[in-house]
Amino acid sequence: MSTALDQLNNAEDVAIVRTSNRKWRARKKQFMPWLFISPYLALFLLFTLFPLLFTVYLSFHAWNPVAGLANMEFVGFNNYAQELTSPWFWKAVYNTVWLAVTTGIPQHVIAIPIAYLLVTAFKGTLRHFYTATMFVPFITSTVAVSLIFYSIYSGNTGILNQWLLALSGVPVIGALFAWVPDAMPIRWLSKSDLIKPSIAFVVIWKYTGFNIVIYSAGFLTVSKDLYDAAKVDGCNAWQQFWHVALPMIRPFIFFALTLTIIGNLQLFEEPFVLTSGDSGGVAQSGLTISYYLYLIGWEWLEMGAAAAVSLLLFIIIAAATSLHFYFNGKKGLEGNR
């Protein structure tokens, strides 16, 4: 009798152990994915979520970082009210929008036809070589590029002024540059009406190659059968580009425009280096929102106001991209379907 009871107890113990093991394995399956992504979650919380929440919190305070956290003072919406009535802020907004438009549009107007020619006129290694060459400015250090153009724009020794003087002496086209000797030296970075165009040219030169790579990838996805069908219908080269190739790369255009909007509204390095870190140059003509944010936070040590400006910049970028998605999102995401 006792042996039977012992066997029954042992069977119950085994069942309990097996049930416990099954529950542990089930919990382990639920827990393991979280364990694998825990490094990412830790980094996200530490370097993304916490700075974001702290920025929002800081925007409602006045704080000089040199004085320490204990001297942080709650001021409510005063930082926002101060910046929204500041002429420097609105000057920075105007300059940023001006540069975003005048550099954004040419990038794509230049990149799309060049990419189309690269894909249709060149094959294999030669196309890759030209594409890589045009991509080099994008991967070159922005500070290095800006310093080189700072030298090019120099009034007395810059190569740009030297070229203009040389062109004024060319017999055939010299009449077009007859004004150059009287205007010398042209202060590209010291005149308020020339600073923004000078910065814009650098931005266009640097980022057009990136868009060429994107559009080249887009044109490579267009089937040759579509071109053949267009030729059968009597389409010339321009009509094939406009009515066949261009509509087919709408998703790529949408993607490239989105990156351009976000990137151009955050310009900092080019204006900072080209204006020698002098608050945007003459009459703050090169002052962008990111540059103004840097001045407030690191030059004037008003971190609360800097946090407020950063959130205002976020709102501007969000509004611009939202408008872009509203007007171009459906066609851009769906392509030519």
Image: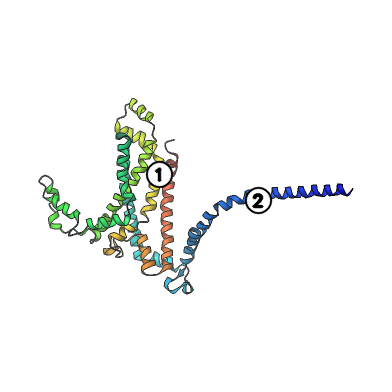
Binning the other alpha carbons within 10 Å of mark 2 as few (below 14), some (14 to 19) or many (20 upward) gives few
Choose between 320 and 169: the one closer to the eye: 169
Q: Which colour style is shown? A: rainbow
Q: Which mark is residue 82?
A: none
What is the x, y in percent for residue 228?
A: 35, 27
Residue farthest along the left direction in this orientation: 171
Which residue, given by chain and number where applicable, does mark 2 sit on? Answer: 27
Binning the other alpha carbons within 10 Å of mark 1 as few (below 14), some (14 to 19) or many (20 upward) gives many
Residue 293 position by quadrant: bottom left
Residue farthest along the right direction in this orientation: 1
Q: Amino acid at mark 2?
A: Arg
| Residue 92 appears in the picture as rendered | yes
Which residue, given by chain and number where applicable, does mark 1 sit on? Answer: 254
Q: Amino acid at mark 1?
A: Phe
Question: Is residue 319 shown left or right of residue 271?
Answer: right
| Residue 64 appears in the picture as rendered | no
What residue lies at 27% left-to-right and 58% top-to-bottom? 147
| Tally of numbered tags | 2
Secondary element at image label 1: helix
Residue farthest along the top direction in this orientation: 232
Question: Is residue 322 shown left or right of residue 35?
Answer: left
Q: Is residue 69 above or below residue 330?
A: below
Secondary element at image label 2: helix
Labels 2, 1: front one: 2
What residue lies at 32% left-to-right and 37% top-to-bottom? 125
What is the x, y in percent for residue 319?
A: 43, 53
What is the x, y in percent for residue 95?
A: 32, 58
Q: Dividing the image into 4 quarters, which one contains the C terminus?
A: top left
Residue 93 position by quadrant: bottom left
Dot placed on the residue nearer the N-terminal end, 2 or 1: 2
What is the x, y in percent for residue 87?
A: 34, 65
